[in-house]
Amino acid sequence: MKYISTRGHAPDLSFEEAMLTGLASDGGLYVPETIPTLSMDEIASFAGQSYEDVAFRVMKPFIGETFTDAEFKEIIAKAYATFSHDARAPLVQLGPNHFLLELFHGPTLAFKDFAMQLIGQLFQAALERRGDRVTIVGATSGDTGSAAIEAFKGLHNVDVFILFPHGRVSDVQRRQMTTPTEANVHALAVEGDFDDCQAALKEMFADHEFRDGVKLAAVNSINWARVLAQVVYYFTSAVSLGAPHRKVSFTVPTGNFGDIFAGYIAKKMGLPIEELVIATNHNDILHRTMETGACTKQGVTPSISPSMDIQVSSNFERALFDVYDREGAAIAQLMDEFKAGEFKISQGAMDRLRDLFASGRASEDETSQAIAAFHARTTEVLCPHTAVAVKVAEAHLSDVPMISLATAHPAKFPAAVEAACGIHPELPERMGDLFGKDERFTVVPNDLATLKALVKERLA
């Protein structure tokens, strides 16, 4: 299995090389050269299997010879051993033909744990075999950072630096990043928004001297291994509802497009998905793009669903690569145009995108109302991101089962939840001391030179 860049000028890599590299040297994102497919019989056989068994069978074709079957099974087992629910990703029924996929039973209470716990084990195994060390730099709008720190803290062959927007994440999200005491963990509060953090990360990768000097690696959703891990729960949830003999639909709250792109990969692998619905908050660049064909930055307005406060949806590039018939030069041109604030998608590519994805938007008021309404109707307490999904999903309900993705535990956003429905969601008992721990982080200006100098200083 080879991996190619969406911009067409980086060398093809193996799975291990693509995973450890993250961002391609031409600025593009790595994708598989081909997408393996599963037969209906193979998908049907997932019924009744453990999450770990399905994960092995879904991901193994993408891994190639990087790990033996025994090694990969052990990696998967370690990755999900800390999850608090035996099903790992259980389904809850919200109403007729509407289901909630709970993705918050991992160690940091967010869907990012499914990918990050796995990628931590993959990195550890690969680096130990190579006798190598890397510097991970990640940008987060809240959940990726805490999940990365949880996965990599204390590992002797990794230093991890997480950039997060100062004052723009929830208190729980911040404390999950700033209270670990391990020396290899560095939490950096950037005076800007998430897009500023993500831009700084991409600029670090573009500086090849810096990149090679610190052995830079990325674990954001620009890393293909992150997307791959998320493909699995589309299969487990769909099979629970009768797939492949019955179609299913999914509504995904998304800002960076990684989670819904994983659903697209599941569909290409053969999972019978009727509809993939992009759900955005009021920072709705993806919904606007789907409606108008123009991807236009309009700035980020803080919301009660901060992990979606994004205007540069990095993984959207992977979808564009496919609908432009994998023409790297065309994607490179679009991304160059986006630096100036906007690019327009060709009519043919736009038609193909609309065949693949639907979209919707939930305002702040609609999000709060959804939290209140679903609590009253079902007693379920939704986090604001999940509420965006279930609100948007309501416009797409049909005789095909709809699965809305619950991407975080409501206790990560207690103020917004309590304001909406009067319930103050408590952290699980195992995290009850989070607010009693000392914080350790550095506030840094939104300045690339300062950030690079700080990384070098901490590694010295």
Image: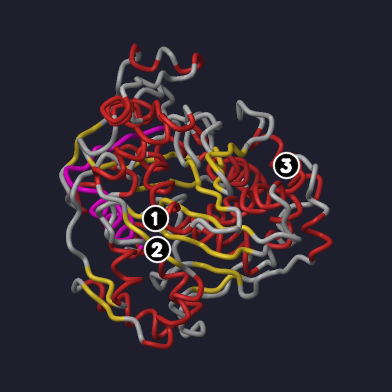
- The residue nearer to you, when weighing 435 against 68, is 435
Span colored in magenta = 184-205
> Looking at the image, is mark 1 or mark 2 earlier in the sequence?
1
Q: Secondary structure at mark 1?
A: strand
Find residue 359 and name its label: 2
Which quadrant of the rendered structure holds the N terminus? bottom right
Q: Nearer the viewer, mark 3 or mark 2?
A: 2
The tag on residue 52 is 3
Q: Quadrant of the C terminus?
A: top left
Q: Amino acid at mark 2?
A: Ser
Instruction: Name which residue type carries label 3.
Output: Glu
Q: Residues within 10 Å of mark 1 (few under 14, many from 20)?
A: many
Q: Does the magenta-highlighted stretch encompass residue 201?
A: yes
Q: Which mark is residue 279?
A: 1
Position of 187 relative to 221 (above/below) = above
| C-beta proximity under 8 Å, tags 3 and 2 | no
Position of residue 361 in the picture relative to residue 275 (left or right)? left
Q: Is residue 236 left or right of residue 351?
A: right
Residue under the point 40% across and 63% down: 359
Q: Residues within 10 Å of mark 3 (few under 14, many from 20)?
A: many
Q: Nearer the viewer, residue 305 or 63?
A: 305
**Residue lying at 32% horizontally and 82% vertically, measured from the top left:** 333
